[in-house]
Structures are given as C-alpha cells and as structure tokens.
Image: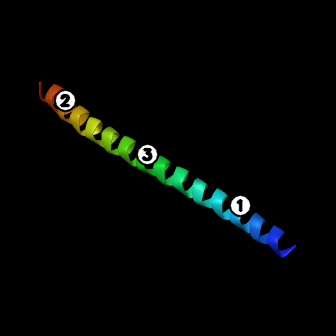
Amino acid sequence: MLNSLDANAEKMNELVESTVKKLAERDKNIEDMVLAMKKEMEKLKGELAIYKAA
C-alpha cells in the first residue's frame, strides 16, 4: 500500500514539474510578445507625432 502511495506521489510530482516548466515557457513567450508590442507602440507613437506636426 505504501509503495502505491509513493508511486502516486511521484507521478503527481512529475506532473507538477512538467506543468511548471510549460507555464514558465509560456510566461517567457508572453514577456517577449509584450516587449515587442511595447516597441511597436513606441514606433507608432513617433509616427503619430510626425503626422500631427505636419
């Protein structure tokens, strides 16, 4: 019985670790996307300022 519980606990730990790795990767991807969007917004703000001045 104890071996069965240990095996289940080990499987759950592996699942949790796998999920944490996937979430960390997604978090990094989202951070990269946000940085790219911020750069694009700054570029567009600069273009808007030029058009407003014209």
As drawn, the label of residue 11 is: 1
Place of residue 32 in the rendered image (x, y in percent of width and height, measured from the top left): 36, 44
Q: Is the residue under label 1 in contact with that under label 3 (CB below 8 Å)?
A: no
Q: Residue at x 34, y 39 (%)?
A: 37
Query: Which element type, helix, strand or loop, lies under badge 1?
Result: helix
Horizontal and vertical percent position of residue 12:
70, 62
* Amino acid at dot 2: Glu
Residue 49 drawn above or below residue 5: above
Q: Residue at x 52, y 54 (%)?
A: 21
Taking depth in this image into account, of 39 and 4 the one nearest to the observer is 4
Name the residue type under label 1. Lys
For disc 3, the neighbor class at 10 Å (few under 14, some 14 to 19, many from 20) is few
Location of residue 7 in the rendering, given as x and y in whole percent from the top left corner:
76, 65
Which residue is depicted at the point 18% across and 35% down? 46
Q: Is residue 12 above or below residue 46?
A: below
**How many residues crowd around disc 1 within 10 Å: few (fewer than 14), some, or many (20 or more)?**
few
Mark positioned earlier in the residue sequence (2 or 1): 1
In this view, the residue in front, 3 or 48, is 3
Q: Secondary structure at mark 2?
A: helix
Occupied quadrant, residue 47: top left
Disc assigned to residue 47 = 2
**Is residue 15 left or right of 5 when viewed as pictured?**
left
- Classify the position of the N terminus by image quarter: bottom right
Quarter of the image for the C terminus: give it.
top left
Q: Secondary structure at mark 3?
A: helix
Residue drawn at point x = 22 percent, y = 34 percent: 43
Amino acid tagged 3: Ile
Q: Which mark is residue 30?
A: 3
Marks 3 and 1 sit apart, C-alpha to C-alpha, by 29 Å
Query: In the visual, does 12 lie left or right of 29?
Result: right
Determine the CA span between mark 2 and mark 1.
Answer: 54 Å
